[in-house]
Image (cartoon, rainbow, N blue to C red):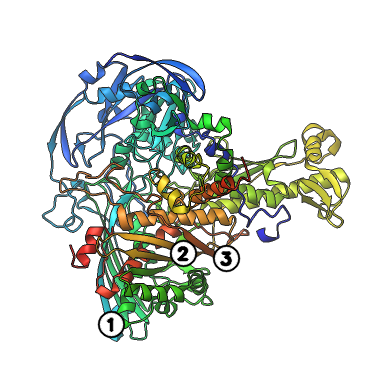
């Protein structure tokens, strides 16, 4: 086993220092070291999207991203995004529209959807579906998720909420 | 009083959001892998690379020397754990070999646990796994459904005689006479692939043995906590009172998590052996080879029909291939048995002949998965109906209208045996064609064909077994509760706690119980808190399977909450010096029934009951009540519905694009329309997957060829279209709330509807497909273009 490496990174806005094994992926690292539960381990081969989180503002598959790669980077999980209030309207819409059933895919869905929202533009359902096509949900059949995102995109682009 | 007349806030019947969803959207759900206990260690299983082999030697020395490893265990180390076999006594002739929790001397499927490493961390356990040396001597495998029973085929378990798990025949009416009278006898063979649930959260368990108290706490991702308690107590040799099962959030289940799995049971046994909490979480690759699979049928069907579209008779032979053992405790034979019981029974048949053969193979474990048997029954029957309609040149809606049991002909005794209380096939068909704009879609189809665009419309009428009584398992000696218990308690401040034996995995069970309790008592729903998923504190219940949570668990909630209301009113009457009949509870306040004037708050009732009972003379308030419910009059509550699919086929590539689904289902009282609709939609995704994409592909050596999410395709947003859901509500009289199940209709109806839409689209080419999944390759072959 290779020796551990020192990394310094920001985690949900706070600077952290850690010593990590080079083979450790980011999700195992965040879950075991910081007990952050929202990034979920679904497949560990980059398909299901349950582990989606943000690194330097871009969504990545946490299971395909090594903890050492986080060195010098800004890592955000749903815990941080949730606390900042950035997605409050979308989270509310997910509850109202029942866009989360078992909830296991939900953090990844929200983080993925958040990227679509950043442009402040409206997107039609096909574009929303395209954007979410790398996130698997086995409960909902996706319609409620698309509905929730569509409604918030409409609200945001018409300026009715923040 | 019925639920529709309840005095409360009128929550029942409204699309109330799920309060529990809030923790999901904030990333605060708690699945088993999130549970961290002091001194907890991690179990990782070594699984057989062979489908059938003798284990000649296992050497664990190098593995045990690896960093962090506490010990490596093999099958023989679990000698104290009982073996198990899922055999239902009421399934005549059913058999299975006994299964150990880890293989001993022989492995029978690729993925069977052979050894387990326990280490301080999961990484350490996984590292050590590669150091275990196992010598195998390969044995011949049984993987071919067609030859599994041939004399030349090896018998997997010689001590049970042959590879037949369960066979059943049913013959009702004069089948031969019906064939003679028919203008056409249609024959087709259908294939339904082996597929699996792919819960995003893998199976997970933490066993926490407390040696001083001799008590086991099991944190498990499961649908039936009391079943786990009963089975684990028995298999681990403990009294049931020594086993506490806790199910917190469950990351998908769909029937996959209603079974006893050897690796999960072994994890708890390890905790007993080591005196430490032990965690096991299945990763994706081992989920594919160790979760139960389902379906895998070859159905040869015959239908007798007249030129007027009257279906006279239905006959079929269904062979289905299960794993090497009948899965414990529910068995691997319910799928076939359901098919015998329900196929085509929504039509007014004159004769019915069924034969099912459930055969053992060396493929992975197989048991009940969402809509057990229904997708196959509905799929092949509805495929036959459309084949008949095409043969006689009749519209598929019309032929169904001519054969569906009339809505006013209930109760109806099915040819296969069951008694149907009430159904609404014709109203459902009227509603779905209205929602679809059926005539318009047909006109569009014709116009588009002129332009070389091939769209198809397919229907599937169906029935569904829900709200099962003890006739499902109990009579067969299977200790799975058919009844549900609910306790409802008023706390001193007037808030309500509902403790229920039936929990949830995202369906919204807790929400509908809160709606029911709030209405039954007359309190705001936000004052109702649910406690489920802990056998230590909840009344005994069956859990979620066979669409029973709403109809059975919901009625227990209603009964308990009504009883509590009565007790609260008696208390309030005592305090206010009035008669209970003069009072009502509205919005959490006891009011005068006649004037609506406030008499006393529930908080004041609670204060007096709990802290100043001395003021009540000899009156003893009872502010916690428990009620249980199980259906008695009808052993099963059969629901009905119809599902339709609109799709487009690219005849150059063979790609099928689902455009839209419609479903009209009659689940009786609709407790929460949004939650029902989302069950339908989610169910459709589980039906669409194996119709177009999903299949567990085994090679001739019994190796699963596509056991990863890269190779096993599940529907994504790109494939799942939107679904219009409609409701016809014909409440069951079996209960006061009148709710039937709704969780499986989407899964049941989708394969047949998609198949019919596909064949409708390809009708101009006289191409017909009946071999699911309908891959582009198969479509092109059918078109003669491959």
Closest to the camera, between mark 3 and mark 2, is 2
Going from N to C along the chain, the mark reached first, 3 or 2, is 2
Q: Which mark is residue B184?
A: 1
Instruction: Give the alpha-carbon distance from disc 2 to disc 1, as whole Å.
Output: 31 Å
User: Residue B153's x, y, as percent?
Assistant: 13, 53
> As rendered, which of B285 and B169 lies closer to the eye?
B285
- Dot 2 lies on which element? strand
Residues marked 2 and 1, same chain: yes
* Quadrant, the N terminus of chain A: top left
Going from N to C along the chain, the mark reached first, 3 or 1, is 1
- Dot 3 lies on which element? loop
Residues marked 3 and 2, same chain: yes
Disc 2 + disc 1, Cβ < 8 Å: no
Q: Which residue is mark 3?
A: B729
Task: Say if residue B344 shows up in the picture.
Answer: yes
> As rendered, which of B434 and B584 lies closer to the eye?
B434
**Side of B26 relative to B234 (left or right):** right
Q: Residue at x 27, y 23 (%)?
A: B127
Identity of the residue furthest to the right in this view: B577
Question: What chain is tagged by disc 1?
Answer: B
Instruction: Give the alpha-carbon distance from disc 3 to disc 2, as whole Å.
Output: 17 Å
Closest to the camera, between mark 2 and mark 1, is 2
Q: Which residue is mark 2?
A: B662
Mark 2, other Cα within 10 Å: few <14 / some 14–19 / many ≥20: many
Q: Is residue A159 above or below residue B272?
A: below
Disc 3 + disc 2, Cβ < 8 Å: no
**Side of B321 relative to A30 (left or right):** left
* Quadrant, the C terminus of chain A: top right
């Amino acid at each position: 086993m290779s020796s551990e490496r020192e990394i310094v990174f920001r985690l949900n806005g706070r600077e952290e220092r850690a010593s990590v094994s080079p083979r450790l992926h980011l999700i195992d690292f965040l879950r075991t070291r910081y007990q952050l539960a929202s990034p979920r381990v679904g497949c560990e081969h980059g398909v299901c999207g349950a582990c989606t989180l943000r690194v330097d503002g871009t969504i990545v598959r946490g299971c395909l991203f090594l903890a050492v790669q986080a060195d010098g980077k800004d890592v955000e999980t749903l815990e941080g995004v949730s606390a900042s209030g950035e997605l409050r309207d979308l989270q509310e819409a997910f509850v109202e529209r029942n866009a989360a059933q078992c909830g296991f895919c939900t953090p990844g869905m929200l983080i993925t959807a958040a990227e679509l929202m950043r442009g402040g533009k409206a997107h039609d359902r096909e574009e929303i579906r395209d954007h979410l096509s790398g996130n698997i949900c086995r409960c909902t059949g996706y319609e409620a998720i698309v509905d929730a995102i569509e409604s918030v995109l409409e609200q945001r682009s018409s300026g009715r909420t923040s | 009083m019925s639920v529709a007349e309840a005095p409360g806030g009128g929550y029942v019947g409204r699309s109330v959001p799920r309060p529990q969803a809030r923790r999901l959207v904030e990333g605060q759900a708690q699945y088993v892998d999130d549970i961290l206990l002091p001194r907890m260690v991690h179990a990782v299983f070594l699984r057989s690379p062979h489908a059938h082999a003798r284990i000649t030697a296992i050497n664990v020395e190098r593995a045990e020397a690896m960093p962090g490893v506490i010990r490596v265990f093999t099958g023989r180390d679990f000698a104290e754990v009982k073996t198990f076999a899922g055999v239902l006594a009421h399934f005549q002739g059913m058999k299975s070999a006994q299964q150990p929790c880890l293989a001993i001397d022989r492995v029978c499927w690729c993925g069977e646990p052979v050894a387990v490493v326990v280490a301080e961390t999961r990484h350490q356990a996984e590292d050590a796994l590669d150091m275990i040396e196992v010598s195998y001597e390969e044995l011949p495998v049984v993987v071919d459904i067609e030859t599994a029973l041939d004399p030349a085929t090896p018998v997997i378990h010689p001590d049970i005689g042959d590879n037949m798990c369960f066979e059943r025949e049913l013959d009702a009416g004069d089948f031969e006479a019906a064939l003679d009278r028919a203008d056409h006898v249609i024959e087709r063979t259908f294939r339904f692939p082996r597929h699996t649930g792919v819960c995003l959260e893998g199976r997970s368990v933490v066993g926490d043995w407390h040696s001083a108290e001799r008590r086991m706490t099991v944190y498990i991702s499961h649908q039936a906590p009391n079943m786990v308690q009963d089975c684990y107590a028995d298999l681990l040799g403990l009294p049931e009172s020594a086993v506490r099962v806790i199910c917190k959030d469950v990351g998908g289940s769909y029937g996959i998590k209603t079974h006893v799995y050897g690796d999960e049971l072994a994890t708890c046994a390890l905790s007993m052996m080591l005196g430490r909490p032990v965690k096991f979480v299945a990763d994706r690759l081992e989920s594919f080879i160790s979760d139960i699979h389902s379906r895998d049928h070859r159905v040869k069907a015959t239908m007798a029909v007249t030129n007027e579209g009257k279906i006279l008779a239905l006959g079929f032979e269904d062979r289905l291939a299960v794993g090497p053992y009948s899965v414990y405790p529910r068995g691997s034979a319910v799928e076939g048995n359901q098919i015998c019981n329900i196929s085509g029974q929504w039509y007014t048949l004159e004769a019915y002949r069924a034969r099912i053969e459930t055969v053992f193979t060396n493929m992975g474990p197989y048991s009940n998965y969402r809509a057990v048997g229904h997708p196959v029954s509905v799929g092949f029957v509805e495929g036959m109906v459309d084949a008949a309609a095409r043969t006689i040149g009749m519209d598929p809606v019309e032929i169904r209208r001519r054969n569906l049991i009339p809505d006013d002909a209930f109760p109806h005794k099915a040819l296969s045996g069951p008694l149907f209380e009430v159904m609404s096939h014709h109203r459902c068909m009227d509603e779905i064609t209205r929602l679809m704009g059926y005539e318009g879609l047909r006109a569009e189809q014709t116009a588009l064909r002129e332009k070389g665009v091939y769209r198809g419309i397919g229907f599937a009428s169906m029935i569904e077994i829900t709200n099962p009584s003890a006739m499902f398992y109990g009579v067969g000696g299977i200790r799975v509760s058919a009844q549900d218990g609910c306790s409802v308690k008023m706390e001193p401040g007037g808030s309500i706690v509902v403790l229920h034996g039936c929990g949830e995995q995202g369906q919204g069970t807790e929400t509908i119980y809160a709606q029911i309790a709030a209405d039954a008592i007359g309190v705001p729903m936000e004052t109702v808190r649910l406690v489920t998923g802990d056998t230590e504190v909840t009344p005994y219940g069956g859990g979620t399977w066979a669409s029973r949570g709403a109809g059975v668990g919901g009625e227990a909630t209603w009964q308990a909450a009504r009883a509590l209301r009565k007790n609260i009113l008696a208390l309030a009457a005592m305090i206010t010096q009035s008669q209970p009949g003069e009072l009502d509870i509205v919005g959490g306040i006891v009011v005068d029934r006649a004037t609506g004037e406030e008499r006393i708050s529930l908080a004041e009732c609670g204060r007096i009951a709990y802290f100043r009972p001395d003021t009540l003379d000899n009156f003893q308030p009872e502010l916690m009540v428990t009620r249980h419910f199980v259906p008695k009059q009808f052993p099963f509550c059969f629901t009905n519905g119809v599902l339709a699919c609109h799709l487009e086929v690219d005849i150059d590539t063979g790609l099928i694009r689902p455009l839209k689904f419609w479903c009209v289902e009659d689940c009786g009282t609709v407790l929460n329309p949004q939650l029902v609709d989302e069950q339908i939609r989610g169910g459709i995704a589980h039906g669409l997957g194996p119709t177009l994409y999903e299949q567990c592909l085994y090679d001739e050596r019994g190796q699963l060829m596509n056991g990863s999410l890269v190779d096993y395709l599940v529907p994504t947003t790109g494939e799942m279209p939107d679904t219009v859901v409609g409701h016809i509500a014909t409440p069951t009289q079996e209960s006061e709330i009148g709710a039937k199940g709704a969780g499986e209709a989407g899964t049941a109806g989708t394969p047949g509807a998609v198949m019919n839409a596909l064949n409708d689209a390809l009708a101009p080419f006289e191409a017909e497909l009946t071999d699911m999944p309908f891959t582009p390759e198969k479509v092109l072959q059918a078109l003669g273009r491959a």
